[in-house]
Image (cartoon, helix red, strand yellow):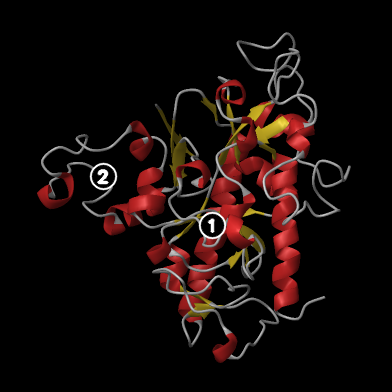
């Protein structure tokens, strides 16, 4: 686990990032996180000034409350949230997320992801990649150099000179994701898995029984789709907020015996601390991913050991471009649900 402290002279924010030691975090990741966090903070200030204490999108849709979906679990809202106003407390629980990725290294004949395996990604038939995105679109691709640049001959297991469609992820799939339109300048965001009681709302990819018997309810804490990000990043003000809302606190000393049972390390794996599980599991934060490719690519963290592609089941993997393309398909369906063509 590595801890990096960064003071930026032009801003009062102090950025802290805690990542597992085989993750690559660059200035692009940090600056994008700070920018998105600042924009969320700006929306909070806007909501505080509004009479109803909520942040609204421009040309917000209006829907009859009787037509809205009733939650099927302990979530406060249904899975049909598209552009609803956001309360101050909801916005405070929104944080930019990350996804672990690797660079596909299929130079060996025995590689399990060769021969078109990645072309048949999870739920491809139910939620295809949007034609303007995805690995076959030839447009709106992510820049592989942002996360995974590596010169020849390549160090360790890292593939030199990866191309856009080499970037793959395995920690989640579209079945566990949703989308939501946030007020500008955030815009459309992908919603990563979150505990049901903490969900601030999004349009789930499976809304309308899209997946049928294959996936009847929204995955919440399913290991294969949690979106392990191998760490977390936070500003000073965010960390102070974490310490306020996390059961037993976020910062030591951990003196709440009811929560920690006398030993804060007793019942938690490394992923709880360095993997960020504490934040989106116990502290009930909502992680979001931008649907803008230029921002999305800055929320992908390179797992430089580059070995999960050989040790994890091949059905777990999807190209980052295809996952983003699927999110855009869900976005299009969300827009249609509120009458936007």
Q: Residue at x 51, y 74 (%)?
A: 78
Quarter of the N terminus within the rendering: top left
Q: Quadrant of the C terminus?
A: bottom right
Q: Quadrant of residue 260?
A: top left
Name which residue lies at 22% across and 34% down. Answer: 265
133 lies above or below 80: above
* SS at mark 1 in the image: helix
Q: Could you tell me residue 228's position as x and y percent? A: 48, 40
Q: Which mark is residue 225?
A: none
Using residue 97 as the reference point, say whether residue 329 is left or right of it. right
Which label is found at residue 251? 2
Residue 208 % position (x, y): 64, 71
Q: In the image, which is nearer the foreground, mark 2 or mark 1? A: 2
What residue lies at 70% left-to-right and 79% top-to-bottom? 338
The residue most toward the right is 138
Q: Residue at x 78, y 38 (%)?
A: 119
Q: Is residue 45 above or below residue 8?
A: below
For the residue carrying disc 1, how many other residues have a C-alpha within 10 Å: few (<14), some (14-19), or many (20+)?
some
Q: Position of residue 193 (x, y in %)?
A: 50, 54
* Residue 177 in view (yes/no): no
Q: Which comes sooner in the sequence, label 2 or label 1?
A: 1
Residue 141: image location, x then y, percent: 80, 42
The image quadrant that residue 14 belongs to is top left
For the question of whether residue 333 can be seen, the reply is yes
According to the picture, the residue beneath numbered tag 1 turns out to be: 38
Question: On the picture, is 335 further left or further right than 240?
Answer: right
Toward the front, the furthest residue is 213
């Amino acid at each position: 686990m590595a801890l990096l402290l960064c003071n930026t002279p032009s801003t009062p924010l102090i950025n802290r990032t805690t990542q597992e030691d085989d993750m690559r975090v660059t200035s692009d990741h940090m600056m994008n996180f700070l920018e998105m966090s600042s924009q969320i903070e700006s929306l909070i200030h806007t909501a505080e000034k509004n009479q109803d204490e909520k942040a609204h999108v421009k040309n917000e849709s209006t829907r009859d409350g009787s037509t809205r979906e009733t939650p099927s679990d302990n979530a406060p809202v249904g899975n049909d949230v598209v552009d609803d106003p956001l309360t101050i407390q909801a916005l405070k629980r929104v944080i930019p997320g990350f996804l672990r990725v690797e660079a596909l290294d299929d130079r060996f004949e025995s590689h399990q992801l060769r021969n078109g395996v990645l072309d048949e990604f999870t739920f491809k038939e139910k939620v295809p990649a949007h034609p303007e995105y995805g690995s076959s679109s030839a447009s709106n691709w992510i820049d592989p150099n942002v996360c995974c640049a590596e010169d020849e001959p390549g160090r360790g297991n890292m593939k030199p000179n990866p191309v856009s469609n080499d970037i793959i992820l395995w920690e989640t799939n579209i079945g566990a994701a949703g989308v939501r339109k946030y007020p500008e300048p955030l815009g459309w965001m992908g919603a990563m898995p979150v505990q049901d009681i903490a969900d601030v709302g999004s349009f789930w990819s499976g809304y309308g029984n899209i997946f049928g018997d294959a996936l009847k309810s929204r995955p919440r804490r399913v290991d294969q789709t949690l979106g392990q990000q191998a760490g977390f990043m936070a500003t000073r003000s965010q960390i102070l907020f974490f310490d306020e809302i996390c059961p037993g606190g976020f910062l030591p000393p951990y003196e709440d015996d009811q929560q920690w049972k006398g030993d804060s390390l007793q019942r938690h794996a490394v992923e709880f601390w360095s993997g960020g599980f504490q934040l989106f599991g116990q502290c009930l934060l909502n992680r979001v991913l931008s649907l803008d490719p230029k921002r999305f690519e800055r929320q992908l963290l390179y797992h430089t050991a580059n070995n999960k592609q050989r040790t994890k089941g091949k059905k777990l993997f999807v190209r980052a471009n295809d996952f983003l393309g699927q999110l855009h398909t869900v976005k299009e369906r969300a827009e249609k649900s509120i009458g936007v063509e």
